[in-house]
Image: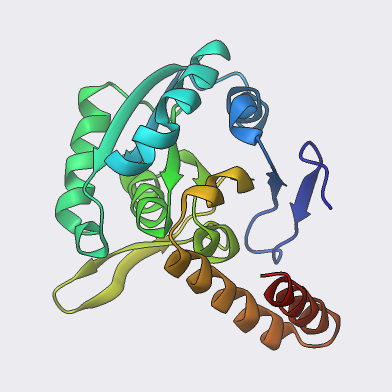
Amino acid sequence: MLNPLDPVIVNTNSQAKRYLISVGDGLLDSVGDWARESLGNNPRKLMIVSNRRVYRLYGEQTAESLRSSGFEVCVWLMKDGERYKSLQSTENLLRALGAAGFTRSDSLLALGGGVVGDLAGFASAIYLRGIRFLQVPTTLLAMIDSSVGGKTGVNTEFGKNLIGAFHHPSAVLADVSTLRTLARREIVAGLCEAVKHAALAGGELFDRTKGFLEANAKSG
């Protein structure tokens, strides 16, 4: 089992970016130190982008840790659901960043599932032609898929994710304790994504994933 304090290094191709993914239980308590280490001393302001449900569960804990590490914390909450991953929501977030006086040295932190992460990532890609952002996924699907790889974007009436940008996070923090509040359906969705990734990778990863699922199915 991974030590919560040991980051996993993700190596992407030479045209992309190299960044750290930290995986463990109870990491949100130290998210401020992690953010400061990931971003350095320059950022003064940090905008938490989330939705009301997730922020009610983890927002104050996250904000307090960030403040203790010297960040001036702002919060912007979007409505929950894929249909709110839109250009209108993006414009509202950009307006909030401008009103709060964010500069190119400041950053965003996406706290939530894939919808939150995609929108926050896209906004950070286009605000002032690009500022840094952090991913703190709170669903299994987002931890496995959307929080890594740098794909950001929004939906429109003519298609899903047709407007976006490749904009990698500076770092990703996956606190598995957040999975305890997920509905069974959301856990299943994440596990299906894990199976897909394992099948594409083949070999050892597929065997390990299959063994994990079988063992947990037998244990109930």
Whether residue 146 is visible: no
Up the image or down, 200 lies above or below 13; here it is below
Toward the viewer: 18 or 80? Answer: 80
Percent x, y for residue 134?
Answer: 52, 41
Whether residue 107 is visible: yes
Side of 105 relative to 85 (left or right): right
Total numbered circles: 0
Up the image or down, 49 lies above or below 165; here it is above
* Residue shown at 64% from the left, 26% from the top: 30
Side of 170 relative to 109 (left or right): right
Percent x, y for residue 9?
Answer: 77, 52
* Residue shown at 76% from the left, 40% from the top: 4
Up the image or down, 31 lies above or below 90; here it is above
* Residue shown at 71% from the left, 76% from the top: 213
Q: Quadrant of the C terminus?
A: bottom right
* Residue shown at 54% from the left, 53% from the top: 168
Toward the viewer: 84 or 97? Answer: 84
Percent x, y for residue 206?
Answer: 77, 83
Toward the viewer: 17 or 8? Answer: 8
